[in-house]
């Protein structure tokens, strides 16, 4: 099985690596664009430099947010630190919005004052082309790592650099139009540079609003409806789950958390319930990998329970075991007989009160039952220390084998053990019977064999017979 720790360490290292490369790339591009923008006087290039500067701040913020987000959960942050990535993405979106508004304001001011002075040269074009190449490489790397790790901060960074490509293209178009206006004497083309800055800012502002909505949705624990339905469908498909009564899913950074309430048949034992919970957890993890799943179970009547199921459910609820359970119809009324084992040290008055309450609960659970009769047995509170004895003349064994021959269904009797427990003798054995013999008939034969042997050997206090089919005879 693959170790989880190395995978987490690898993912963390990869996220930090691309975040650091993003900082280095943003730093270089910001300085180059600022230098060329100042030398050329291009408002479009300066606006692009400002955009890159915002991206640099965002990249630094992303780098530190990724480091914090990868810290494990602690007492103050029981769901981990993943939300810091969503906070980082929200701040980055805000910075982008502010920069767009500032650039639009400056462009409109230059157009109104007609203070546009450009110094045309090849250097702005070369820098902008280099910026496009760098931004394409950075956005592709960031998007790929964000897809593998589910990091919203890296996804926002990828969006920033992808938007830089479009912004830079618009600035190039603006520079080209301004140069053409100056070269061919077309005055209105001289405003192409600030106009390009406005177009770029409006485009980025529109995408920023979309990104902000996504970030706010993550911060307020909003998730797509199909994600929740995927979790519900996975859990509901597990064998034994009657229904998913409640499902809450939230996201923190790259991790999902799912809190589910599953309705299970109330006759399920603790072990069976545990198996269903494990299966449901695995199913949810397959549907939404990496999900931290918490499951609460509630017992429910599946609507297909028999009277026997309901009686055993009441017994299990009271932490007692019932056996020899039977239901008879007498004059059209149902009567239940059962054997219940209680602690041998329990006084009769307390045992009787417990059984009376148990019977009343059974009558309430199954109103069609008219009466309940309970045989109280003592459950040993201590571990017995039997002594194996030598059977003189093998009298008990011979008596058992002789009695077994009186039943044509019994093929053989083997693995006989005789033990003395205090003043009593206990006997156990294996009894081979035909494979297809119904269990009802098997029980009748075993009970009859026990009764007849005790008549032959009254010193035998307790007899335990293990029936086994002929094809699986372990003798």
Image (spheres, grey):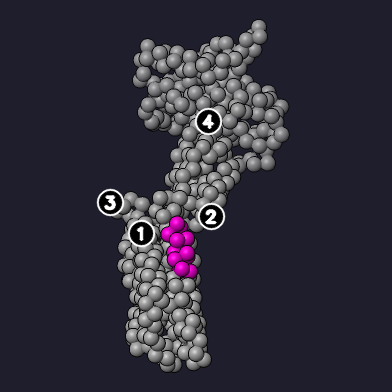
Q: Earlier in the sequence, mark 4 or mark 3?
A: 3
What is the secondary structure assignment of the residue under circle 2?
helix
Taking the image as shown, residue 304 lies to the left or right of residue 167, namely right
Q: Earlier in the sequence, mark 2 or mark 3?
A: 3
Q: Which of the 4 image quarters holds residue 252?
A: bottom left
Circle 1 or circle 4, nearest the eye: 1
Q: Position of residue 202 (x, y in %)?
A: 46, 68
The label shown at residue 286 is 2
Circle 3 or circle 1, nearest the eye: 1
Distance from disc 2 to disc 1, alpha carbons, whole Å, reads: 28 Å
At label 3, counting other C-alpha atoms closer than 10 Å, the crowd grade (few under 14, some 14-19, many 20 or more) is: few
Residue at the disc numbered 4: 300
- Residue 424 is at least partly visible in this image: no
**Residue located 59% across and 19% down the image:** 326
Taking the image as shown, residue 394 lies to the left or right of residue 438, namely left
Residue at the disc numbered 1: 87
- Residue 278 is at least partly visible in this image: yes
Circle 2 or circle 1, nearest the eye: 1
Is the Cβ of the residue at disc 4 closer than 8 Å to that at disc 2? no
Q: Earlier in the sequence, mark 2 or mark 1?
A: 1
Distance from disc 1 to disc 4, alpha carbons, whole Å, reads: 42 Å
Decide which of 26, 354 is in the foreground and name it: 26
Circle 4 or circle 3, nearest the eye: 3
At label 4, counting other C-alpha atoms closer than 10 Å, the crowd grade (few under 14, some 14-19, many 20 or more) is: some
Q: Is residue 65 above or below residue 379?
A: below
Q: Position of residue 45 (x, y in %)?
A: 40, 81
């Amino acid at each position: 099985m693959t170790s989880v720790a190395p995978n987490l360490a690898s993912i963390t290292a990869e996220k930090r690596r691309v975040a650091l490369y993003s900082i280095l790339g943003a730093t270089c591009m910001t300085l180059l664009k600022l230098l060329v923008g100042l030398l050329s006087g291009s408002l479009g290039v300066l606006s692009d430099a400002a955009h890159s500067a915002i991206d640099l701040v965002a990249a630094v913020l992303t780098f530190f947010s990724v480091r914090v987000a990868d810290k494990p959960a602690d007492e103050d942050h029981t769901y981990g630190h993943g939300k810091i990535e969503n906070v980082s993405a929200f701040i980055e979106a805000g910075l982008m919005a502010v920069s767009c508004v500032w650039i639009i304001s400056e462009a409109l001011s230059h157009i109104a004052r007609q203070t546009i002075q450009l110094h045309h040269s090849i250097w702005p074009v070369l820098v902008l082309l280099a910026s496009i190449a760098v931004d394409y490489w950075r956005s592709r790397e960031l998007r790929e790592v964000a897809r593998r790790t589910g990091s919203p901060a890296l996804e926002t960074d990828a969006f920033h650099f992808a938007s830089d490509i479009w912004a830079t293209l618009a600035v190039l178009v603006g520079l080209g139009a301004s140069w053409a206006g100056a070269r061919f004497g077309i005055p209105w083309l001289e405003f192409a540079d600030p106009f390009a800055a406005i177009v770029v800012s409006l485009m980025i502002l529109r995408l920023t609003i979309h990104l902000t909505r996504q970030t706010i949705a993550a911060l307020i624990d909003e998730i797509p409806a199909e994600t929740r339905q995927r979790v519900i469908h996975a859990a509901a498909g597990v064998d034994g789950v009657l229904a998913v009564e409640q499902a809450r899913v939230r996201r923190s950074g790259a991790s999902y958390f799912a809190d589910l309430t599953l309705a299970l048949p109330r006759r399920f034992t603790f072990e069976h319930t545990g198996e269903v919970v494990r299966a449901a957890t695995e199913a949810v993890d397959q549907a939404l990998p990496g999900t931290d799943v918490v499951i609460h179970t509630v017992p429910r009547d599946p609507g297909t329970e028999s009277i026997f199921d309901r009686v055993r459910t009441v017994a299990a609820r009271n932490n007692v075991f019932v056996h020899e359970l039977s239901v008879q119809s007498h004059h059209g009324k149902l009567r239940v007989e059962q054997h219940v084992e209680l602690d041998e040290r329990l006084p009769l008055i307390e045992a009787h009160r417990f059984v009376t309450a148990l019977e009343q609960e059974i009558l309430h659970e199954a109103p069609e039952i008219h009466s309940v009769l309970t045989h109280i047995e003592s459950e040993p509170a201590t571990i017995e220390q039997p002594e194996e004895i030598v059977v003189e003349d093998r009298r008990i064994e011979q008596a058992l084998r002789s009695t077994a021959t009186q039943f044509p269904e019994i093929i053989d009797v083997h693995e006989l053990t005789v033990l003395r427990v205090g003043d009593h003798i206990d006997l156990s054995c294996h009894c081979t019977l035909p494979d297809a013999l119904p269990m009802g008939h098997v029980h009748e034969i075993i009970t009859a064999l026990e009764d007849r042997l005790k008549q032959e050997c009254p010193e035998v206090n307790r007899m335990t017979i293990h029936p086994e089919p002929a094809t699986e005879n372990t003798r």
